[in-house]
Image (cartoon, grey):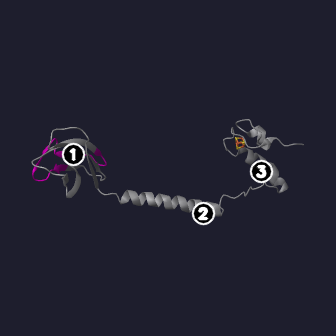
Amino acid sequence: MKCNDCVRICPVGIDIKEGLSTSCIACAECIDACWLKSSKRNLPPFPNYKGKIIRPKTFWLAGTTAASALVVVLLFAMRPPVEFTLSRVQEPLPAGLNRYAFTISNNTSEPLDLKIEAPEGTTLIGEHAVSIKPFGETRSKVLIKAEGKRDTVTLTLKGDGISISREAGFL
Ligand code: SF4
């Protein structure tokens, strides 16, 4: 008599013996049902059935996963305590005046009080002081007014033992 245990147990009501189906949710209930019957006759429930969780594939998959996790942890641990990015905003402004967008990320568990400094011969217009919560980020913009012609401007982020300089173009 034909066994239909796999069909009876299937939660989506398909007969896997008729071939693969897109309705299959890979729950493996049919394999367990088949194994209960076939193991009594010392037969595998399907041709490539190994019946073991621990096999070579398990080790290389676990090793790859552990190595990936280690890389993620190392990348996280090697992040600088503060990240500072600066870019010139492309917009028409009077000569000698440029706007800059900046982002500051605090990768530490302590709040940071920092300030942005502009080089000699320039005036920074906007908020100089920045307070960032632990693991927080702040984005803002400042204007730089320069006396005389220059091609670049370097802004420096200082405070709490931190000094990071970033250069951007100046038109
Ligand atoms: S794996 Fe689950 S859903 Fe797919 S055929 Fe077997 S019992 Fe049905």
Residue 134 on the magenta segment? yes
- Earlier residue among tags 2 and 3: 3
Residue tagged 1? 131
* Residue 35: numbered disc: 3
Q: Which residues are magenta?
A: 114-137
Q: Which of the pair 133/152 is nearer the observer?
A: 152
Q: Which residue is mark 2?
A: 59
Q: Secondary structure at mark 2?
A: helix
Give neighbour class at mark 2: few <14, some 14-19, many 20+ (Cα, 10 Å): few
Query: Left or right: 122 with respect to 109?
Result: left
Residue name at image x 13 percent, y 50 percent = 149
Tell which quarter ligand 1 is in. top right
For disc 1, the neighbor class at 10 Å (few under 14, some 14 to 19, many from 20) is: some
Mark 3: secondary structure: helix
Q: CA distance from mark 1 to mark 2?
A: 47 Å
Direction from residue 80 to residue 22 in the image, left or right: right
145 with respect to 41 (left or right): left
Q: Are marks 1 and 2 in contact (CB under 8 Å)?
A: no
In which quarter of the view is residue 63 placed?
A: bottom right
**Identity, as a three-letter code, of the amino acid under mark 1:** Ser
Q: Residue at x 66, y 58 (%)?
A: 53
